[in-house]
Image (cartoon, coloured by chain):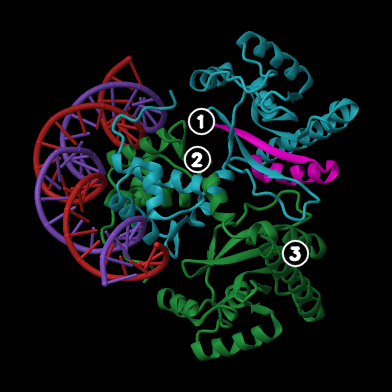
Chain colours: A green, B cyan, C purple, D red
DNA sequence: GAGGGCGTTCGATACTGTCGAACGGCTTGT
DNA sequence: ACAAGCCGTTCGACAGTATCGAACGCCCTC
Protein backbone atom coordinates (compact mmCIF):
# COMPACT_ATOMS: atom_id res chain seq x y z
CA UNK A 1 0.00 0.00 0.00
CA UNK A 2 1.29 3.44 -0.90
CA UNK A 3 0.53 5.10 2.42
CA UNK A 4 -2.60 5.24 4.47
CA UNK A 5 -3.60 8.55 5.93
CA UNK A 6 -5.32 8.10 9.26
CA UNK A 7 -7.52 11.14 8.92
CA UNK A 8 -7.66 11.98 5.25
CA UNK A 9 -9.16 15.36 4.57
CA UNK A 10 -12.15 15.02 2.34
CA UNK A 11 -12.04 18.40 0.73
CA UNK A 12 -8.39 17.84 -0.12
CA UNK A 13 -9.36 14.69 -1.95
CA UNK A 14 -11.99 16.51 -3.97
CA UNK A 15 -9.50 19.28 -4.72
CA UNK A 16 -6.98 16.76 -5.97
CA UNK A 17 -9.63 14.96 -7.99
CA UNK A 18 -10.36 18.23 -9.71
CA UNK A 19 -6.68 18.77 -10.44
CA UNK A 20 -6.38 15.26 -11.81
CA UNK A 21 -9.39 15.87 -13.97
CA UNK A 22 -7.96 19.08 -15.34
CA UNK A 23 -4.67 17.36 -15.98
CA UNK A 24 -6.28 14.61 -18.00
CA UNK A 25 -8.61 16.89 -19.86
CA UNK A 26 -5.89 19.47 -20.36
CA UNK A 27 -8.48 22.02 -19.28
CA UNK A 28 -12.22 22.29 -19.45
CA UNK A 29 -15.43 23.79 -18.27
CA UNK A 30 -17.05 23.14 -14.94
CA UNK A 31 -19.49 20.70 -16.43
CA UNK A 32 -16.61 18.69 -17.95
CA UNK A 33 -15.07 18.28 -14.52
CA UNK A 34 -18.45 17.34 -13.09
CA UNK A 35 -18.84 14.63 -15.71
CA UNK A 36 -15.32 13.36 -15.17
CA UNK A 37 -15.22 13.34 -11.39
CA UNK A 38 -18.83 13.04 -10.32
CA UNK A 39 -18.45 15.93 -7.93
CA UNK A 40 -21.35 18.35 -7.66
CA UNK A 41 -21.38 21.41 -9.85
CA UNK A 42 -21.38 23.97 -7.08
CA UNK A 43 -18.62 22.16 -5.25
CA UNK A 44 -16.42 22.12 -8.31
CA UNK A 45 -17.17 25.77 -8.79
CA UNK A 46 -16.18 26.68 -5.26
CA UNK A 47 -12.92 24.78 -5.42
CA UNK A 48 -11.98 26.21 -8.78
CA UNK A 49 -12.78 29.72 -7.61
CA UNK A 50 -10.60 29.26 -4.58
CA UNK A 51 -7.75 27.87 -6.65
CA UNK A 52 -8.08 30.70 -9.09
CA UNK A 53 -8.06 33.27 -6.36
CA UNK A 54 -4.78 31.82 -5.19
CA UNK A 55 -3.31 31.85 -8.68
CA UNK A 56 -3.18 28.11 -9.23
CA UNK A 57 -5.83 28.00 -11.89
CA UNK A 58 -6.42 30.10 -14.97
CA UNK A 59 -9.81 30.85 -16.42
CA UNK A 60 -10.08 31.69 -20.08
CA UNK A 61 -13.64 32.37 -21.09
CA UNK A 62 -15.51 29.51 -19.46
CA UNK A 63 -12.53 27.18 -19.68
CA UNK A 64 -10.45 26.41 -16.63
CA UNK A 65 -6.79 25.42 -16.94
CA UNK A 66 -3.97 24.44 -14.67
CA UNK A 67 -1.90 27.53 -13.95
CA UNK A 68 1.81 28.03 -14.36
CA UNK A 69 2.06 28.05 -10.60
CA UNK A 70 2.36 24.31 -10.91
CA UNK A 71 5.32 24.76 -13.20
CA UNK A 72 7.14 26.39 -10.34
CA UNK A 73 6.17 23.69 -7.87
CA UNK A 74 7.29 21.12 -10.40
CA UNK A 75 10.66 22.76 -10.83
CA UNK A 76 11.18 22.73 -7.09
CA UNK A 77 10.33 19.05 -7.04
CA UNK A 78 12.62 18.35 -9.97
CA UNK A 79 15.56 20.16 -8.45
CA UNK A 80 15.41 18.26 -5.23
CA UNK A 81 18.48 16.13 -5.44
CA UNK A 82 21.30 16.63 -7.92
CA UNK A 83 20.01 14.31 -10.63
CA UNK A 84 18.37 16.85 -12.88
CA UNK A 85 20.90 19.66 -12.67
CA UNK A 86 23.82 17.31 -13.29
CA UNK A 87 21.98 15.02 -15.65
CA UNK A 88 20.41 17.47 -18.01
CA UNK A 89 23.58 18.70 -19.73
CA UNK A 90 24.71 15.13 -20.32
CA UNK A 91 21.31 14.09 -21.54
CA UNK A 92 21.42 16.94 -24.01
CA UNK A 93 24.81 15.77 -25.21
CA UNK A 94 23.61 12.23 -25.70
CA UNK A 95 20.60 13.52 -27.60
CA UNK A 96 22.78 15.63 -29.85
CA UNK A 97 25.35 12.93 -30.47
CA UNK A 98 22.95 10.08 -31.11
CA UNK A 99 20.00 12.02 -32.40
CA UNK A 100 17.78 9.72 -30.37
CA UNK A 101 15.15 10.45 -27.77
CA UNK A 102 16.96 10.67 -24.46
CA UNK A 103 15.41 10.23 -21.04
CA UNK A 104 16.36 10.96 -17.47
CA UNK A 105 14.37 9.01 -14.90
CA UNK A 106 14.13 8.44 -11.20
CA UNK A 107 11.82 6.65 -8.79
CA UNK A 108 9.02 8.12 -6.77
CA UNK A 109 6.13 6.37 -5.06
CA UNK A 110 7.51 3.06 -6.31
CA UNK A 111 7.21 4.03 -9.95
CA UNK A 112 9.54 5.40 -12.56
CA UNK A 113 9.18 9.08 -13.36
CA UNK A 114 10.67 11.01 -16.23
CA UNK A 115 12.62 13.96 -14.92
CA UNK A 116 13.62 15.12 -18.35
CA UNK A 117 13.25 14.06 -21.92
CA UNK A 118 14.82 15.62 -24.95
CA UNK A 119 15.46 15.07 -28.60
CA UNK A 120 17.65 17.12 -30.89
CA UNK A 121 17.07 18.04 -34.49
CA UNK A 122 13.39 18.50 -33.98
CA UNK A 123 11.84 21.69 -35.15
CA UNK A 124 8.85 21.20 -32.93
CA UNK A 125 9.28 18.80 -30.08
CA UNK A 126 6.35 16.78 -28.90
CA UNK A 127 4.97 17.88 -25.62
CA UNK A 128 7.43 16.71 -23.02
CA UNK A 129 6.66 13.72 -20.89
CA UNK A 130 8.39 15.11 -17.82
CA UNK A 131 6.59 13.96 -14.73
CA UNK A 132 5.00 10.98 -16.41
CA UNK A 133 5.07 7.69 -14.60
CA UNK A 134 6.11 4.32 -15.97
CA UNK A 135 6.41 0.83 -14.57
CA UNK A 136 9.75 -0.32 -13.26
CA UNK A 137 9.70 -3.91 -14.47
CA UNK A 138 9.27 -3.25 -18.17
CA UNK A 139 11.39 -0.20 -18.80
CA UNK A 140 15.13 0.04 -19.30
CA UNK A 141 15.43 2.87 -16.82
CA UNK A 142 13.36 0.99 -14.28
CA UNK A 143 15.52 -2.11 -14.50
CA UNK A 144 18.71 -0.08 -14.36
CA UNK A 145 17.47 1.55 -11.18
CA UNK A 146 16.16 -1.63 -9.57
CA UNK A 147 19.45 -3.41 -10.18
CA UNK A 148 21.15 -0.92 -7.88
CA UNK A 149 18.43 -0.47 -5.29
CA UNK A 150 17.56 -2.43 -2.17
CA UNK A 151 15.16 -5.25 -2.89
CA UNK A 152 12.51 -3.45 -0.89
CA UNK A 153 11.99 -1.10 -3.82
CA UNK A 154 11.09 -3.99 -6.09
CA UNK A 155 8.97 -5.50 -3.32
CA UNK A 156 7.02 -2.31 -2.94
CA UNK A 157 6.56 -1.93 -6.66
CA UNK A 158 5.33 -5.49 -7.08
CA UNK A 159 3.10 -5.05 -4.08
CA UNK A 160 1.36 -2.00 -5.46
CA UNK A 161 1.46 -2.46 -9.19
CA UNK A 162 2.43 -6.07 -9.83
CA UNK A 163 4.47 -7.32 -12.76
CA UNK A 164 1.84 -6.45 -15.32
CA UNK A 165 2.14 -7.97 -18.76
CA UNK A 166 2.10 -5.41 -21.55
CA UNK A 167 3.57 -7.40 -24.44
CA UNK A 168 4.70 -10.95 -25.04
CA UNK A 169 8.20 -9.87 -24.02
CA UNK A 170 7.26 -8.47 -20.63
CA UNK A 171 8.95 -10.35 -17.79
CA UNK A 172 6.20 -11.19 -15.34
CA UNK A 173 7.99 -13.79 -13.25
CA UNK A 174 9.71 -12.47 -10.17
CA UNK A 175 12.59 -14.96 -10.17
CA UNK A 176 13.28 -14.55 -13.83
CA UNK A 177 13.19 -10.82 -13.36
CA UNK A 178 15.67 -10.86 -10.51
CA UNK A 179 18.03 -12.95 -12.59
CA UNK A 180 17.87 -10.41 -15.37
CA UNK A 181 18.86 -7.76 -12.87
CA UNK A 182 22.05 -9.70 -12.23
CA UNK A 183 23.28 -9.07 -15.77
CA UNK A 184 22.26 -5.46 -15.45
CA UNK A 185 24.48 -5.17 -12.40
CA UNK A 186 27.41 -6.75 -14.21
CA UNK A 187 27.17 -4.67 -17.36
CA UNK A 188 25.72 -1.49 -15.84
CA UNK A 189 23.30 -1.62 -18.73
CA UNK A 190 19.62 -2.46 -18.97
CA UNK A 191 17.61 -3.16 -22.09
CA UNK A 192 13.96 -2.90 -22.87
CA UNK A 193 13.29 -5.23 -25.77
CA UNK A 194 9.73 -4.25 -26.54
CA UNK A 195 8.68 -5.27 -23.06
CA UNK A 196 6.34 -2.36 -22.59
CA UNK A 197 5.27 -1.57 -26.10
CA UNK A 198 5.67 -3.55 -29.29
CA UNK A 199 8.13 -1.81 -31.57
CA UNK A 200 9.74 0.26 -28.83
CA UNK A 201 13.22 -0.42 -27.51
CA UNK A 202 15.46 1.28 -24.95
CA UNK A 203 18.91 1.13 -23.42
CA UNK A 204 19.57 2.55 -20.00
CA UNK A 205 22.45 2.90 -17.59
CA UNK A 206 22.09 3.63 -13.89
CA UNK A 207 23.27 6.82 -12.23
CA UNK A 208 24.87 5.90 -8.93
CA UNK A 209 25.88 7.64 -5.75
CA UNK A 210 29.13 6.94 -3.96
CA UNK A 211 27.65 3.85 -2.31
CA UNK A 212 26.57 2.41 -5.67
CA UNK A 213 22.93 3.05 -4.97
CA UNK A 214 20.84 4.17 -7.92
CA UNK A 215 19.70 7.77 -7.96
CA UNK A 216 18.12 7.32 -11.35
CA UNK A 217 19.00 6.30 -14.87
CA UNK A 218 19.59 7.73 -18.30
CA UNK A 219 18.29 6.05 -21.43
CA UNK A 220 17.64 6.42 -25.11
CA UNK A 221 14.56 4.98 -26.72
CA UNK A 222 13.46 4.43 -30.27
CA UNK A 223 11.92 2.12 -32.85
CA UNK A 224 12.82 -1.56 -32.67
CA UNK A 225 13.53 -1.59 -36.37
CA UNK A 226 16.31 0.93 -35.91
CA UNK A 227 17.52 -0.22 -32.50
CA UNK A 228 19.33 -3.40 -33.56
CA UNK A 229 22.77 -4.95 -33.85
CA UNK A 230 25.93 -3.05 -33.16
CA UNK A 231 24.26 0.35 -33.24
CA UNK A 232 21.92 -0.66 -30.47
CA UNK A 233 24.16 -2.87 -28.37
CA UNK A 234 27.41 -0.96 -28.78
CA UNK A 235 27.03 2.60 -29.99
CA UNK A 236 23.93 3.57 -28.04
CA UNK A 237 24.79 1.38 -25.09
CA UNK A 238 28.19 2.99 -24.73
CA UNK A 239 26.72 6.45 -25.12
CA UNK A 240 24.30 6.08 -22.22
CA UNK A 241 26.81 4.19 -20.12
CA UNK A 242 29.48 6.83 -20.41
CA UNK A 243 26.95 9.61 -19.86
CA UNK A 244 25.75 7.83 -16.73
CA UNK A 245 29.32 7.55 -15.55
CA UNK A 246 29.97 11.23 -16.07
CA UNK A 247 26.80 12.19 -14.21
CA UNK A 248 27.55 9.81 -11.35
CA UNK A 249 31.06 11.15 -11.10
CA UNK A 250 30.02 14.77 -11.12
CA UNK A 251 27.42 14.17 -8.46
CA UNK A 252 29.82 12.30 -6.23
CA UNK A 253 32.48 14.94 -6.71
CA UNK A 254 30.10 17.76 -5.90
CA UNK A 255 29.14 16.11 -2.65
CA UNK A 256 32.72 15.64 -1.57
CA UNK A 257 33.42 19.35 -1.63
CA UNK A 258 31.78 21.02 1.30
CA UNK B 1 -8.19 42.64 -7.64
CA UNK B 2 -7.11 39.26 -9.00
CA UNK B 3 -10.39 37.48 -8.45
CA UNK B 4 -12.64 37.19 -5.47
CA UNK B 5 -14.10 33.82 -4.70
CA UNK B 6 -17.58 34.14 -3.23
CA UNK B 7 -17.32 31.05 -1.10
CA UNK B 8 -13.65 30.31 -0.67
CA UNK B 9 -12.98 26.91 0.78
CA UNK B 10 -11.00 27.22 3.95
CA UNK B 11 -9.29 23.88 3.87
CA UNK B 12 -8.19 24.56 0.32
CA UNK B 13 -6.52 27.72 1.51
CA UNK B 14 -4.66 25.89 4.23
CA UNK B 15 -3.64 23.22 1.75
CA UNK B 16 -2.27 25.83 -0.61
CA UNK B 17 -0.51 27.60 2.23
CA UNK B 18 1.25 24.37 3.02
CA UNK B 19 2.28 23.95 -0.62
CA UNK B 20 3.57 27.50 -0.71
CA UNK B 21 5.51 26.86 2.44
CA UNK B 22 7.07 23.72 1.03
CA UNK B 23 7.91 25.55 -2.16
CA UNK B 24 9.73 28.31 -0.34
CA UNK B 25 11.47 26.00 2.07
CA UNK B 26 12.26 23.50 -0.67
CA UNK B 27 11.06 20.87 1.78
CA UNK B 28 10.96 20.48 5.51
CA UNK B 29 9.58 18.87 8.59
CA UNK B 30 6.11 19.38 9.95
CA UNK B 31 7.35 21.77 12.56
CA UNK B 32 9.01 23.91 9.88
CA UNK B 33 5.71 24.28 8.09
CA UNK B 34 4.00 25.08 11.36
CA UNK B 35 6.50 27.84 12.04
CA UNK B 36 6.20 29.20 8.53
CA UNK B 37 2.44 29.13 8.15
CA UNK B 38 1.08 29.29 11.66
CA UNK B 39 -1.19 26.35 11.02
CA UNK B 40 -1.61 23.85 13.81
CA UNK B 41 0.66 20.85 13.93
CA UNK B 42 -2.04 18.22 13.63
CA UNK B 43 -3.71 20.07 10.80
CA UNK B 44 -0.49 20.24 8.84
CA UNK B 45 0.02 16.60 9.53
CA UNK B 46 -3.38 15.62 8.24
CA UNK B 47 -3.03 17.63 5.04
CA UNK B 48 0.42 16.30 4.33
CA UNK B 49 -0.70 12.75 4.95
CA UNK B 50 -3.57 13.20 2.56
CA UNK B 51 -1.34 14.72 -0.08
CA UNK B 52 1.15 11.94 0.34
CA UNK B 53 -1.51 9.29 0.06
CA UNK B 54 -2.45 10.81 -3.27
CA UNK B 55 1.13 10.92 -4.47
CA UNK B 56 1.58 14.66 -4.45
CA UNK B 57 4.03 14.77 -1.60
CA UNK B 58 7.13 12.72 -0.83
CA UNK B 59 8.34 11.92 2.63
CA UNK B 60 12.00 11.16 3.16
CA UNK B 61 12.75 10.42 6.78
CA UNK B 62 10.89 13.17 8.60
CA UNK B 63 11.28 15.58 5.70
CA UNK B 64 8.39 16.35 3.42
CA UNK B 65 8.93 17.44 -0.18
CA UNK B 66 6.86 18.45 -3.15
CA UNK B 67 6.39 15.39 -5.34
CA UNK B 68 7.07 15.01 -9.03
CA UNK B 69 3.35 14.93 -9.56
CA UNK B 70 3.59 18.68 -9.75
CA UNK B 71 6.10 18.34 -12.54
CA UNK B 72 3.43 16.69 -14.61
CA UNK B 73 0.83 19.31 -13.76
CA UNK B 74 3.37 21.98 -14.60
CA UNK B 75 4.09 20.43 -17.98
CA UNK B 76 0.41 20.37 -18.78
CA UNK B 77 0.19 24.03 -17.86
CA UNK B 78 3.27 24.85 -19.90
CA UNK B 79 2.02 23.08 -22.98
CA UNK B 80 -1.25 24.89 -23.03
CA UNK B 81 -0.88 27.07 -26.05
CA UNK B 82 1.81 26.71 -28.69
CA UNK B 83 4.35 29.05 -27.14
CA UNK B 84 6.55 26.55 -25.38
CA UNK B 85 6.62 23.79 -27.97
CA UNK B 86 7.38 26.21 -30.78
CA UNK B 87 9.53 28.53 -28.74
CA UNK B 88 11.85 26.10 -27.02
CA UNK B 89 13.83 24.99 -30.09
CA UNK B 90 14.39 28.60 -31.10
CA UNK B 91 15.32 29.59 -27.59
CA UNK B 92 17.87 26.82 -27.55
CA UNK B 93 19.29 28.08 -30.82
CA UNK B 94 19.58 31.61 -29.54
CA UNK B 95 21.29 30.33 -26.40
CA UNK B 96 23.76 28.32 -28.44
CA UNK B 97 24.49 31.08 -30.92
CA UNK B 98 24.86 33.90 -28.42
CA UNK B 99 25.98 31.93 -25.41
CA UNK B 100 23.71 34.15 -23.32
CA UNK B 101 20.96 33.29 -20.91
CA UNK B 102 17.79 33.01 -22.98
CA UNK B 103 14.25 33.31 -21.68
CA UNK B 104 10.80 32.51 -22.91
CA UNK B 105 8.03 34.35 -21.09
CA UNK B 106 4.30 34.81 -21.13
CA UNK B 107 1.68 36.49 -18.98
CA UNK B 108 -0.51 34.91 -16.35
CA UNK B 109 -2.48 36.53 -13.57
CA UNK B 110 -1.23 39.91 -14.80
CA UNK B 111 2.40 39.04 -14.24
CA UNK B 112 5.23 37.79 -16.39
CA UNK B 113 6.11 34.12 -16.03
CA UNK B 114 9.13 32.30 -17.34
CA UNK B 115 8.05 29.36 -19.44
CA UNK B 116 11.59 28.33 -20.20
CA UNK B 117 15.09 29.47 -19.52
CA UNK B 118 18.29 28.04 -20.88
CA UNK B 119 21.96 28.71 -21.22
CA UNK B 120 24.44 26.75 -23.26
CA UNK B 121 28.04 25.94 -22.43
CA UNK B 122 27.25 25.33 -18.80
CA UNK B 123 28.37 22.10 -17.27
CA UNK B 124 25.92 22.44 -14.44
CA UNK B 125 23.07 24.83 -15.02
CA UNK B 126 21.62 26.75 -12.16
CA UNK B 127 18.25 25.55 -11.06
CA UNK B 128 15.81 26.72 -13.68
CA UNK B 129 13.57 29.66 -13.03
CA UNK B 130 10.68 28.21 -15.01
CA UNK B 131 7.41 29.24 -13.43
CA UNK B 132 8.90 32.23 -11.65
CA UNK B 133 7.01 35.48 -11.80
CA UNK B 134 8.34 38.90 -12.69
CA UNK B 135 6.87 42.35 -13.05
CA UNK B 136 5.77 43.53 -16.46
CA UNK B 137 6.87 47.16 -16.28
CA UNK B 138 10.53 46.59 -15.57
CA UNK B 139 11.41 43.60 -17.70
CA UNK B 140 12.19 43.45 -21.38
CA UNK B 141 9.82 40.55 -21.92
CA UNK B 142 7.09 42.33 -20.01
CA UNK B 143 7.38 45.48 -22.10
CA UNK B 144 7.53 43.50 -25.33
CA UNK B 145 4.32 41.75 -24.37
CA UNK B 146 2.52 44.86 -23.11
CA UNK B 147 3.31 46.72 -26.33
CA UNK B 148 1.22 44.21 -28.24
CA UNK B 149 -1.54 43.64 -25.73
CA UNK B 150 -4.78 45.48 -25.06
CA UNK B 151 -4.32 48.28 -22.57
CA UNK B 152 -6.44 46.37 -20.10
CA UNK B 153 -3.50 44.11 -19.40
CA UNK B 154 -1.39 47.04 -18.29
CA UNK B 155 -4.35 48.42 -16.35
CA UNK B 156 -4.78 45.20 -14.49
CA UNK B 157 -1.10 44.89 -13.77
CA UNK B 158 -0.86 48.44 -12.44
CA UNK B 159 -4.01 47.89 -10.45
CA UNK B 160 -2.69 44.85 -8.66
CA UNK B 161 1.03 45.41 -8.47
CA UNK B 162 1.64 49.06 -9.31
CA UNK B 163 4.67 50.41 -11.13
CA UNK B 164 7.05 49.57 -8.33
CA UNK B 165 10.46 51.21 -8.33
CA UNK B 166 13.31 48.73 -8.13
CA UNK B 167 16.24 50.82 -9.36
CA UNK B 168 16.83 54.41 -10.38
CA UNK B 169 16.10 53.38 -13.95
CA UNK B 170 12.69 51.87 -13.32
CA UNK B 171 9.94 53.67 -15.17
CA UNK B 172 7.27 54.41 -12.61
CA UNK B 173 5.25 56.97 -14.50
CA UNK B 174 2.34 55.61 -16.48
CA UNK B 175 2.47 58.15 -19.29
CA UNK B 176 6.19 57.85 -19.69
CA UNK B 177 5.81 54.11 -19.71
CA UNK B 178 3.16 54.10 -22.40
CA UNK B 179 5.34 56.31 -24.57
CA UNK B 180 8.18 53.85 -24.23
CA UNK B 181 5.83 51.14 -25.46
CA UNK B 182 5.37 53.13 -28.66
CA UNK B 183 9.01 52.62 -29.61
CA UNK B 184 8.72 48.98 -28.69
CA UNK B 185 5.86 48.66 -31.14
CA UNK B 186 7.84 50.34 -33.89
CA UNK B 187 11.01 48.35 -33.45
CA UNK B 188 9.50 45.09 -32.18
CA UNK B 189 12.19 45.25 -29.54
CA UNK B 190 12.12 46.02 -25.84
CA UNK B 191 15.06 46.77 -23.59
CA UNK B 192 15.57 46.46 -19.90
CA UNK B 193 18.34 48.87 -18.96
CA UNK B 194 18.88 47.84 -15.37
CA UNK B 195 15.31 48.74 -14.57
CA UNK B 196 14.75 45.78 -12.34
CA UNK B 197 18.19 45.07 -11.00
CA UNK B 198 21.32 47.15 -11.12
CA UNK B 199 23.83 45.52 -13.43
CA UNK B 200 21.31 43.41 -15.28
CA UNK B 201 20.21 44.11 -18.85
CA UNK B 202 17.88 42.37 -21.29
CA UNK B 203 16.61 42.55 -24.86
CA UNK B 204 13.29 41.05 -25.79
CA UNK B 205 11.12 40.69 -28.84
CA UNK B 206 7.43 39.84 -28.79
CA UNK B 207 5.95 36.63 -30.14
CA UNK B 208 2.76 37.49 -31.98
CA UNK B 209 -0.28 35.68 -33.27
CA UNK B 210 -1.85 36.39 -36.62
CA UNK B 211 -3.69 39.40 -35.22
CA UNK B 212 -0.48 40.92 -33.85
CA UNK B 213 -1.41 40.19 -30.29
CA UNK B 214 1.40 39.11 -28.00
CA UNK B 215 1.46 35.49 -26.92
CA UNK B 216 4.71 36.01 -25.08
CA UNK B 217 8.25 37.14 -25.67
CA UNK B 218 11.76 35.82 -26.03
CA UNK B 219 14.72 37.57 -24.46
CA UNK B 220 18.37 37.29 -23.54
CA UNK B 221 19.71 38.71 -20.32
CA UNK B 222 23.15 39.35 -18.94
CA UNK B 223 25.53 41.71 -17.18
CA UNK B 224 25.30 45.40 -18.03
CA UNK B 225 29.06 45.54 -18.46
CA UNK B 226 28.87 43.06 -21.31
CA UNK B 227 25.53 44.15 -22.75
CA UNK B 228 26.64 47.39 -24.41
CA UNK B 229 27.15 49.02 -27.80
CA UNK B 230 26.74 47.14 -31.02
CA UNK B 231 26.78 43.71 -29.42
CA UNK B 232 23.82 44.60 -27.28
CA UNK B 233 21.84 46.80 -29.64
CA UNK B 234 22.56 44.95 -32.87
CA UNK B 235 23.83 41.42 -32.46
CA UNK B 236 21.67 40.34 -29.53
CA UNK B 237 18.74 42.47 -30.58
CA UNK B 238 18.69 40.92 -34.03
CA UNK B 239 19.07 37.44 -32.57
CA UNK B 240 15.98 37.69 -30.38
CA UNK B 241 14.02 39.56 -33.01
CA UNK B 242 14.59 36.99 -35.70
CA UNK B 243 13.93 34.15 -33.28
CA UNK B 244 10.68 35.81 -32.28
CA UNK B 245 9.75 36.12 -35.93
CA UNK B 246 10.43 32.47 -36.61
CA UNK B 247 8.37 31.40 -33.61
CA UNK B 248 5.50 33.71 -34.52
CA UNK B 249 5.56 32.44 -38.07
CA UNK B 250 5.61 28.79 -37.09
CA UNK B 251 2.74 29.27 -34.69
CA UNK B 252 0.65 31.12 -37.23
CA UNK B 253 1.41 28.55 -39.88
CA UNK B 254 0.49 25.66 -37.62
CA UNK B 255 -2.86 27.20 -36.85
CA UNK B 256 -3.69 27.67 -40.49
CA UNK B 257 -3.48 23.97 -41.21
CA UNK B 258 -6.48 22.21 -39.84
C1' DG C 1 17.79 8.63 33.41
C1' DA C 2 15.55 12.88 32.93
C1' DG C 3 14.25 16.41 29.80
C1' DG C 4 12.83 18.40 25.57
C1' DG C 5 11.56 18.36 20.80
C1' DC C 6 8.88 16.41 17.54
C1' DG C 7 5.51 13.35 14.99
C1' DT C 8 1.43 11.08 15.58
C1' DT C 9 -3.09 9.98 17.47
C1' DC C 10 -7.48 11.07 19.56
C1' DG C 11 -11.81 13.36 20.95
C1' DA C 12 -14.94 17.29 21.08
C1' DT C 13 -16.83 21.29 19.09
C1' DA C 14 -17.87 24.89 16.09
C1' DC C 15 -17.47 25.47 11.67
C1' DT C 16 -18.08 24.76 6.85
C1' DG C 17 -17.89 21.75 2.82
C1' DT C 18 -21.33 19.59 0.34
C1' DC C 19 -25.53 19.21 -1.91
C1' DG C 20 -29.83 20.42 -4.39
C1' DA C 21 -32.63 23.95 -5.87
C1' DA C 22 -33.22 28.11 -8.05
C1' DC C 23 -31.76 32.17 -10.69
C1' DG C 24 -30.08 34.27 -14.88
C1' DG C 25 -27.27 34.69 -18.95
C1' DC C 26 -26.23 32.75 -23.34
C1' DT C 27 -26.94 29.93 -27.22
C1' DT C 28 -29.84 26.80 -30.17
C1' DG C 29 -33.60 25.61 -32.77
C1' DT C 30 -38.04 26.40 -34.72
C1' DA D 1 -38.79 36.47 -32.10
C1' DC D 2 -39.79 33.28 -28.80
C1' DA D 3 -39.11 29.07 -26.38
C1' DA D 4 -36.19 25.61 -24.60
C1' DG D 5 -31.99 23.96 -22.96
C1' DC D 6 -27.53 24.27 -21.18
C1' DC D 7 -24.47 25.95 -18.06
C1' DG D 8 -22.29 28.98 -14.55
C1' DT D 9 -23.27 31.09 -10.48
C1' DT D 10 -25.62 31.96 -6.08
C1' DC D 11 -28.11 30.66 -1.92
C1' DG D 12 -29.75 28.15 2.18
C1' DA D 13 -29.73 24.14 5.14
C1' DC D 14 -27.90 20.18 7.00
C1' DA D 15 -24.65 16.73 8.07
C1' DG D 16 -20.24 16.01 8.10
C1' DT D 17 -15.68 17.18 9.29
C1' DA D 18 -11.64 20.42 9.52
C1' DT D 19 -9.63 22.38 13.20
C1' DC D 20 -7.68 22.62 17.57
C1' DG D 21 -5.51 21.27 21.94
C1' DA D 22 -4.16 17.67 24.71
C1' DA D 23 -2.03 13.49 25.33
C1' DC D 24 0.99 9.70 23.99
C1' DG D 25 5.33 7.83 22.49
C1' DC D 26 9.57 8.06 20.11
C1' DC D 27 14.28 9.64 19.68
C1' DC D 28 18.04 12.39 20.76
C1' DT D 29 20.72 15.18 24.01
C1' DC D 30 22.56 16.44 28.16
In three-dimensional space, the C-alpha distance between marks 3 and 1, rounded to whole angstroms, equals: 38 Å
Q: Main secondary structure of the magenta part?
A: helix
Q: Which residues are magenta?
A: B83-108
Q: Percent x, y for residue A132?
A: 54, 60
Q: Are marks 1 and 2 on the same chain?
A: no
Where B27 falls versus B208 (above or below)? below
- What is the CA distance from the residue labelled 1 to the residue labelled 2? 9 Å
> To which chain does the residue with label 2 belong?
A
Residue B196 left/right relative to B63: right
Q: Looking at the image, is mark 3 or mark 1 nearer the viewer? A: 1
- Pinpoint residue B224: horizontal percent, then vertical percent: 79, 29
> Residue B124: x, y in percent?
73, 55
Residue topped by disc 1: B109
Report the mark closest to the observer, 2 or 3.
Answer: 2
Q: Earlier in the sequence, mark 2 or mark 3?
A: 2
Q: SS class of the residue under badge 1?
A: loop
| Crowdedness near tag 3: few (<14), some (14–19) or many (≥20) residues, C-alpha within 10 Å | some
Q: Read off the chain for label 1.
A: B
- Residue B211 visible, this orientation: no
Q: Few, some or many C-alpha atoms within 10 Å of disc 1 (few <14, some 14-19, many ≥20)?
A: many
Q: Find disc 2 in the rendering and name its residue.
A: A67
Categorize mark 2 by other alpha carbons within 10 Å: few (<14), some (14-19), many (20+). many
**Residue designated by label 3:** A100
Q: Say if labels 2 and 3 share a chain.
A: yes
Q: Residue at x 61, y 43 (%)?
A: B130
State left or right for residue B159 relative to residue B191.
Answer: left
Amino acid sequence: MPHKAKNPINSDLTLLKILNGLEELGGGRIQDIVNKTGITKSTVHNHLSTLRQQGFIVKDGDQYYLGLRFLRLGEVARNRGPLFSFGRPEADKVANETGELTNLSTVEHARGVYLYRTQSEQEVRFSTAAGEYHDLHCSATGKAILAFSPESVLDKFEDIHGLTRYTENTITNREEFEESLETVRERQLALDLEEYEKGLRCVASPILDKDDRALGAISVSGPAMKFTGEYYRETLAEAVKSAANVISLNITRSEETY
